[in-house]
Image (cartoon, helix red, strand yellow):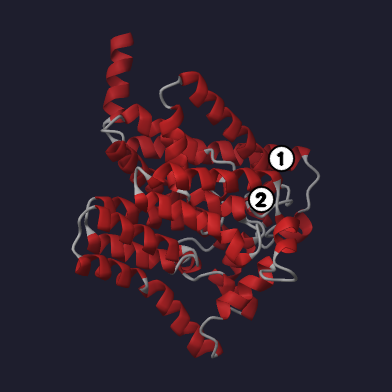
Amino acid sequence: MENKINTIVNWISKRQVLVAAFLAAGFIILTLGLGHISNQTIPGNVASARYNAEPGTHLDFMAEWDGIHYLHIAKHGYTDNSLVAFFPLYPLAIRLVMFLVSSPLISGLVVSWLALFGSLIFYLKILKEYFDNDKVTSVMGALLFLFFPTGVFLAATYSEGLFTLLALGALYFALKNRYILAGILTGLATATRPDGVFIILLVAAVLYEAKAKLWQILVAAGSGMVGLIGYVTYLGIKLHKPFAFISAQKHHLKWAVGSFIQPMINSLSPIALVLFILAIISTVYWYSRRKSFALYSLLFVLLPIVTTNFAGYPRYMLINFPLQIMLLNKFKRSTLAYSLVLVLSAILWGYFTMHYVAGYTGGS
């Protein structure tokens, strides 16, 4: 019997698609289950935070705060100038699924969940590359990624799932020195979130380390700008304000309001502070190991300084892949240490998930 079980486990582990499907399905089920418990036990702030256009689906707790805006854009377009803070590719993907599924909510969840599945495929591939085809370690890393404290946003109607898929795909192809595919996925990433520009720098730096030719790096970086340029052009035509998304971001996150220091202090939470310190440690850790990862982590150190705000910072840190790989590399050799890190992260994930469902946090 034991030999048969080992045979089955080895067979599955060799097929990353099955591993990714199993992990994605398990994570989604756990998230929905925890969300249901939160609905039953925590007095909610749902009146102002929750999507309420489709109460019959019983999944409205997966669409709150920014999720409401994405679903509105998918159904009605940019009806308000403040909505241009939300980049177009995710709502466009929802709109396309709505040709098959009339519900914007279900369509949004389908896009997010399929993107989560694809993200895990690429993440497992990247970890196997980095850890010399060690399948067990790659799964350990995937679990740290899923149960990152703000991992709930990978399964909600947020752009994080789609953006993560594109970012990890771009990173994987850059590591393989396949600059055209890396550039295409980066271009889609910059049409998904404003921090897609981070992926341009990451891909360019990784290709440089992979000994790509200068013109190949420029092609990838230029392709990566297409999504952002396309959106800027659209805003220029529609609103005559090409960079209206910046002022819209200030409206939603209160960027650069008041003094330089006070907004940062007011928006700083304990988890944001811990993640900020970890971003600094990750930058230092990767500097002598892989400069591209150090540069990418440095961008997350600079983010709250440039925006003068920690609003949303724990959610943005979800895509700081070098930080997660650093933690995996540090603790993978000790079952106890790794288990403690994973359990602590999962506890924070549970906290964030239940409070998101209750309408008390949109990722800040």
* Along the line of sight, the residue nearer the viewer: 155 or 364: 364
Residue situated furthest right in the rendering = 43
Q: Position of residue 92 (x, y in %)?
A: 46, 69
Callout 1, which amino acid? Answer: Ser
Residue at left offset 34%, top offset 39%: 127
Q: Which label's residue is closer to the chain start, 1 or 2?
A: 1
Task: Tell me if mark 1 has few (under 14), some (14-19) or many (20+) residues whose alpha carbon lies within 10 angstroms of its own.
Answer: many
Secondary structure state at the residue bearing disc 2: helix
Relative to 81, residue 298 above or below: above
According to the picture, the residue beneath numbered tag 1 turns out to be 38
* Along the line of sight, the residue nearer the viewer: 134 or 272: 272
Q: Distance between the Cα atoms at labels 1 and 2?
A: 9 Å
Callout 2, which amino acid? Answer: Phe
Residue at left offset 60%, top offset 61%: 305
According to the picture, the residue beneath numbered tag 2 turns out to be 61
Quarter of image, res 257 = bottom right
Relative to 298, residue 230 above or below: below
